[in-house]
Image (spheres, grey):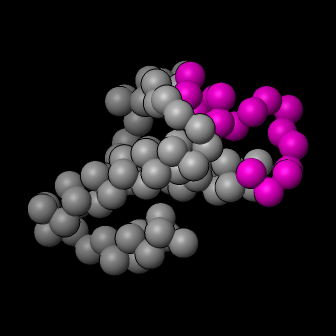
Amino acid sequence: MASWDDLPEHVRYFKLLQYKSAIELEMKGIKFRRSVAQHVRDTLGLKGNREKLIEQLKAKANDILEGRKTRGDDYTEYKEAIND
């Protein structure tokens, strides 16, 4: 499997959205085979409880969007997705 930095930007953004949504479901009581929060900590090297992980994921996603903004790409539909 490719490392995080080797993935295309749009794939990294989508994965961040998936992780955020999965952690929110986990907080509501949905059980997964392995804790999504622990997977995110291991994969991305983040630290903290689930709430802090969500904030860090949002920050990483917003960093990707800011990079798109500085290049002049349209990013408005993506901005709404991460902040839901």
Asked if residue 37 is among those painted magenta in the image, a careful observer would answer: yes
Query: Which sits in the foreground, 18 or 73?
Result: 18
Up-down: is 1 above or below 17?
A: above
Residue 6 location (% of width, % of height): 37, 29
Left/right placement of residue 37 relative to residue 44 reads: right
Q: Quadrant of the N terminus?
A: top right
Left/right placement of residue 26 relative to residue 47 reads: right
Residue plotted at (57% across, 49% down): 51
Q: Is residue 53 visible?
A: yes
Residue plotted at (30% across, 52% down): 64
Asked if residue 80 is among those painted magenta in the image, a careful observer would answer: no
Query: Which sits in the foreground, 70 or 19?
Result: 19
Q: Which residues are magenta?
A: 27-42
Up-down: is 62 above or below 78?
A: above
| Total numbered circles | 0
Q: Quadrant of the C terminus?
A: bottom right
Residue 55 location (% of width, % of height): 46, 51
Up-down: is 17 above or below 39?
A: below
Q: Is residue 15 visible?
A: no
Residue plotted at (57% across, 33% down): 40
Residue plotted at (68% across, 55% down): 24
Up-down: is 2 above or below 29?
A: above
Residue 48 location (% of width, % of height): 53, 34
Query: Which sits in the foreground, 27 or 64?
Result: 27
Left/right placement of residue 31 relative to residue 49 reads: right
Residue 70 location (% of width, % of height): 12, 62
